[in-house]
Image (spheres, helix red, strand yellow):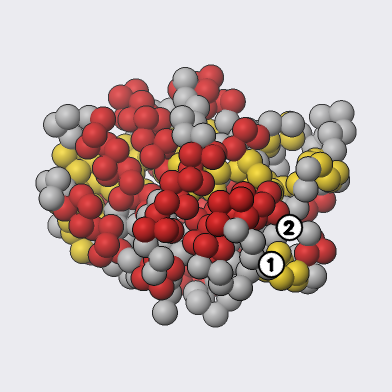
Amino acid sequence: MRVLITGICGFVGSTLALEFLRRTPGIEIIGVDNLSRPGSELNRQTWKRRGVRFVHGDIRLASDLEGLPAVDWVVDAAANPSVLAGVGDQTSSRQLLEHNLIGTINLLEFCKRAAAGLLMLSTSRVYSQRRLAELRMDVRDDAFVPIMQDGEPPGLTPEGITEAFSTEAPLSLYGASKLASEVLALEYAAAFDLPVYVNRCGVLAGAGQFGKPDQGIFSFWLHAYRSRRPLTFIGFRGTGHQVRDCLHARDLAPLLLKQMAAGGKHGEIVNVGGGSDHAMSLRQLTDWCARRFGSHDIGRGLVDRLYDVPWLVLNADRAAQVWDWQPSTALDDILEEIAGEAEQHPDWLDRSADS
């Protein structure tokens, strides 16, 4: 089996490449990446000696995909994964859409030519930002907990939100680009008989993740806390009660391999997150860091930030039912892995963050 991984030099793409090689003898992996992110070359070295073929290319450019050989599957791990992309100084709105939407169109055209299946790594941010912000919250153990109201809104459960939760706008420019990509992928599946699976991922984390707070808050917070960098609870009255769930990127691999083995034209959409067992608030994460690294003062930012929501946890019951999948790495093990890396590589934020 031959697999193309886009964004292979990123944290998720690199992690998946190594897991695929470990779990599937004889698999052939081709990776494409534009090497635009600091730290990309560091990840490249981890799988280069394992026989992975690397192509320097940009999925925003259709011509960069024309010379690629035919493959059986494409794993799309290339994207601008920041919910603030397109509205800040780092990335323009046009750049965001070129990365996340035009790139998807080019990949779908490639899949059509090669008769390849597509495994799309989407995001929990396709769910309505407004509906999430409107949820009534209680506070328990320094963390927001949604107040359940007789099944309203649809898709809200104590274990997290299901695939039935609203995807109505506003989402964010990032979320909208990924939702539009999902729709296009499913339309290509129907029109051209392509196997397509859409996996809506929660916050991914683990050792080796790049140091950007708006892309991997668990990894960033641990590294920044250990090095005693300034940290701030932003919004929500500066309490740090906002909650996210966490999933190790390598736990995606067995699900994706099952989807490859199934083949066929399914157009399945599933949440792929850690769920309530892998969820914690920023304040709880800070308390974990204090026990692990000692005390560190955290600032309080009282102004709410665009697109922030108090609680976003994914219910992955559908993935369990359809694919017999569930997270295999405990939350504490994920945090300890990142903490160990932070101690071994105290300069990681400088090496992997944008200059």
The quarter in which the C terminus is drawn is bottom left
Q: What secondary structure is found at the residue carrying circle 1?
A: loop
Q: Residue furthest front?
A: 294
Residue 246, position as x, y percentages in the image? 55, 43
In the rendered view, tell whether residue 153 sits above or below residue 173.
above
Residue 93, position as x, y percentages in the image? 53, 72
Q: Which residue is mark 1?
A: 298
Residue 323, position as x, y percentages in the image? 46, 22
| Horizontal side of residue 274 vs 206, given as left or right | right
Q: Which residue is mark 2?
A: 240
The quarter in which the N terminus is drawn is top left
| Horizontal side of residue 120 vs 285, given as left or right | left
The residue at 16%/39% (across/down) is 28
Which of discs 2 and 1 lies nearer the camera? The answer is 1
In terms of depth relative to the viewer, which is nearer, 301 or 182? 301
Q: What secondary structure is found at the residue carrying circle 2?
A: loop
| Horizontal side of residue 233 vs 343, given as left or right | right
In the rendered view, tell whether residue 77 sits above or below residue 41.
above
Q: Quadrant of residue 55?
A: bottom left
Task: Mark 2 or mark 1: name the one nearer the start of the chain.
Answer: 2
The residue at 87%/33% (across/down) is 149
